[in-house]
Image (cartoon, rainbow, N blue to C red):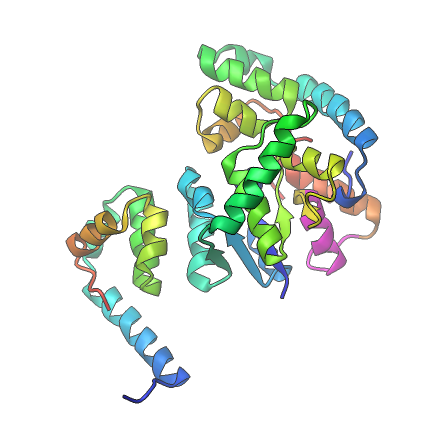
Amino acid sequence: MNELSVEELKAIEEWGKKVRREKANWEFIRKLPSRLRKALEYYIETGDLYVASRIAGLKIEEFNELRIKAGVPST
Amino acid sequence: MKLASLDTCFLIDWALYRHRDYITKIFDKILVSEHVLREIYSSKALDFVTELLSKGFMTLVPLTSQEEEIARRLITTALSDPRIPELHETEVYAVAIALTYNAIIVTENKAVLWLKVYYPNEIPQPIWRSIDVLLELVKRSVIKVNSVEEALKVGRRVLYRHQT
Amino acid sequence: MAYPTELLTPKDLEVLEEWGRRVRREKANWKFINSLPDKFRKALEYYIETGDIRAASVKFDINIYLLNELRIKAGIPSTI
């Protein structure tokens, strides 16, 4: 299996960000308390589930459920 | 690489400062523990931290047994000296992270400051308060002033009124 | 009074402690502080005396950000 190059990794990251942004249910996200909203926005930008869960003050599993409810794909 | 380890006592005021993002002109990376994130209550601090995290200026540092050991040692020292105020976990972990990663401790916490002054060997890392960050910004001409006295006045005005 | 932190000595800390307490007492809006519920009033009074916002937030079980907002509303400068 070939290793990914830096350019490929960056392209995947950009693609992931684009998909998360497009698929997210922004109406649902905007109605959330600010902490959860900010955590989801952070996740959408970075794809970093662990840090996003820390921002939200939730366990990873709990934040993941929120991610799903918000329609944000895991990419 | 110039690293900073930030704690809540610094963030609660710095996040209110109009030019709070200037801190990224001094440090290459800002390290925080989960404890700092967990405590955030104000929307301004939340905006500030999530912006720094998503831009890669800030990193969440997991605590290991090394930081736990450092924290234990510092708390023991503080407990043994009645002059030193009580050290709490958010601040002590910020110091432990700084010691592990050779970062500057950026804090306004009284206990950390007292510990540094009375036991400098326990905390060899520099400690910066908001005034030190502002003076560094003046030194780098990010904030423009005409003299050292004016620099200190700017510092006091920023710190005491949050309006500059 | 402002001080580059690396130059502070134990004697400076003593002076800063006294100066800080005096400034906090003088600048505080006591009318506002006395109008607050007991817990918040005591926390601010504790902060005025000690200059330690972390200790005040822990002792009176108030979120440190919330206490800091109250400190600002009460006109108490942040000093060490």
Q: Toward the viewer: B40 or B87? A: B87
Q: Quadrant of the C terminus of chain C?
A: top right
The quadrant where residue A1 appears: bottom left
Q: Quadrant of the N terminus of chain C?
A: top right
Relative to A45, is B110 on the left or the right?
Answer: right
**Residue C54, relative to residue A45: is it above or below?**
above
Relative to B55, is C2 on the left or the right?
Answer: right
Q: Toward the viewer: B99 or A50? A: B99
The quadrant where residue A58 appears: top left
**Residue C73, relative to residue B63: is it above or below?**
above
Residue B37 visible, this orientation = yes
**Residue B35, relative to residue C55: is it above or below?**
below
Please report the residue visible at 48 percent of the width from the left and 31 percent of the height from the top: C64
Q: Residue A6 at x, y = what percent?
A: 41, 83
Q: Residue B49 at x, y = what percent?
A: 46, 51
The quadrant where residue A43 appears: bottom left
The magenta-colored residue range is B131-145
Q: Residue B144 at x, y = what percent?
A: 74, 55
The answer to whether residue B143 is magenta is yes
**Residue C32, relative to residue A47: is it above or below?**
above
Please report the residue visible at 55 percent of the width from the left and 55 percent of the height from the top: B21
Relative to A75, is C67 on the left or the right?
Answer: right
Please report the residue visible at 28 percent of the width from the left and 41 percent of the height from the top: A33
Instruction: Provide the major secondary structure of the magenta segment.
Output: helix
Q: Toward the viewer: C74 or C20? A: C20
Please report the residue visible at 58 percent of the width from the left and 15 percent of the height from the top: C45
Residue C78 visible, this orientation = no
Relative to B41, is B127 on the left or the right?
Answer: right
